[in-house]
Amino acid sequence: MRGDLEPTQPAQQRLRFAYGVIQEIETAQSKRVAQAWALSINPRLGFESPIKAIREDRFQETAAAAQALLEDACDG
């Protein structure tokens, strides 16, 4: 096994996006909330998890779902 393997460009884009969204939720809420959100089914994503949506390159939908979570948290 070689130690110089890197993810493909699309995989890197998905990883960066996932990291950014999860970090934003973690900063606003908590690490537990961010983890639960990333792995739980989400009605805004057709009852699929944000992780699955990101794997399918559904960045705009996932960002909107994250924003809705953050706005709901601000509204109380």
Image (cartoon, helix red, strand yellow):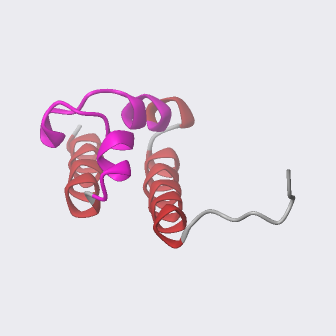
Kindly indicate the quadrant of the structure image that contains residue 42.
top left
The image shows residue 9 at horizontal and vertical percentages of: 52, 72
Residue farthest to the bottom, as pictured: 9
Q: Is residue 40 on the magenta stretch? A: yes
Residue at x 22% of width, y 48% of height: 65
The image shows residue 4 at horizontal and vertical percentages of: 83, 66
Q: Is residue 36 above or below residue 29?
A: above
Residue at x 45% of width, y 49% of height: 28
The magenta stretch is: 34-57
On screen, residue 18 versus residue 53, left or right, reads right
The image shows residue 11 at horizontal and vertical percentages of: 50, 61
Q: Is residue 31 on the magenta stretch? A: no
Which is more toward the observer, 65 or 3? 3
Kindly indicate the quadrant of the structure image that contains residue 58.
bottom left
- Quadrant into which the C terminus falls: top left
On screen, residue 43 versus residue 11, left or right, reads left
On screen, residue 35 versus residue 51, left or right, reads right
Residue at x 46% of width, y 54% of height: 18
